[in-house]
Image: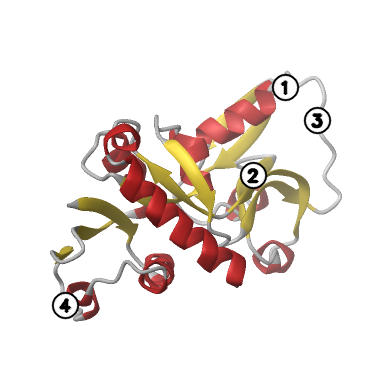
Amino acid sequence: MLNIALPKGRLGERVYGLLKNAGFPCPDLEAGGRRLIFENPALGLRYFWVKPMDVGVYVERGAADVGIVGKDILLESTPQVYELLDLGLGKCTMAVAAPRGFRNPTGTTLRVATKFPEIAARYYAGQSRDIDIIHLNGAIELAPLMGLSHVIVDIVETGETLRENGLEVLDRVAPISARLIANTASMKFETTRIQELLQGLEKQVNAR
């Protein structure tokens, strides 16, 4: 079986649509229900749903041969995997934002609120800026409004939430979208099948 990790939610459903159209269907999955593992024995495929943050772990440790994960998760957790293809789904931007009219406080530690401490740390290390990272899990936009942080580092899709809360983008850190990744050992031992899947997805992406 070729094991494929799909992220739970709307993104995973869209990705499965691409895989199905690329010639990798799984009627067992389409039947729905609360199951997590689905198989197509005829094609030697096994799909399973996992939390988006966990896809990289399953692929890195070999429980999945391939998986689909957001670039934000790859940048934050840096799993040892091969990144094979940008699927162009779930496009958004990792950005630095602050209240309108913000002025960088020189001579003091910059307080940065984020769900992505590793990404934020690398970004500011590249600027040799002294920062204090505040790791939050909720609405990051609230932090500068309540004086908890000077700026935030977060995913921005349309920017509407920022505008409604009086914030604006200061800098764009990285483009974010769904990526196809593969286990390093699987790329050696399942090369043909992974290449077939990759080529099928490339055709679907290019046809959109």
User: In the drawing, what numbered circle is on residue 129?
Assistant: 1
Give the residue at mark 2.
Answer: 152
Callout in the foreground (3, 2): 2
Q: Secondary structure at mark 2?
A: strand
- Amino acid type for the residue under numbered disc 1: Arg
Q: Position of residue 163 (x, y in %)?
A: 74, 65
Callout in the foreground (2, 4): 4
Callout in the foreground (4, 1): 4
Q: Secondary structure at mark 3?
A: loop
- Amino acid type for the residue under numbered disc 4: Gly
Cα separation between marks 2 and 4: 39 Å
**Which quadrant of the figure has residue 6?**
bottom left
Give the residue at mark 3.
Answer: 105
The tag earlier along the polypeptide, 2 or 4, is: 4
Residue lying at 44% horizontally and 36% vertically, measured from the top left? 82
- Amino acid type for the residue under numbered disc 3: Pro
Q: How many marks?
A: 4
The tag earlier along the polypeptide, 3 or 4, is: 4
Q: For the residues labelled 4 and 1, say whether their Cβ atoms are less than 8 Å apart.
A: no
The tag earlier along the polypeptide, 3 or 2, is: 3
Give the residue at mark 4.
Answer: 33
**Crowd band around label 2 with a 10 angstrom C-alpha radius: few (<14), some (14–19), many (20+):** many
Callout in the foreground (3, 4): 4
Cα separation between marks 4 and 1: 49 Å
Residue 138 at least partly seen: yes
Callout in the foreground (3, 1): 1
Cα separation between marks 3 and 2: 14 Å
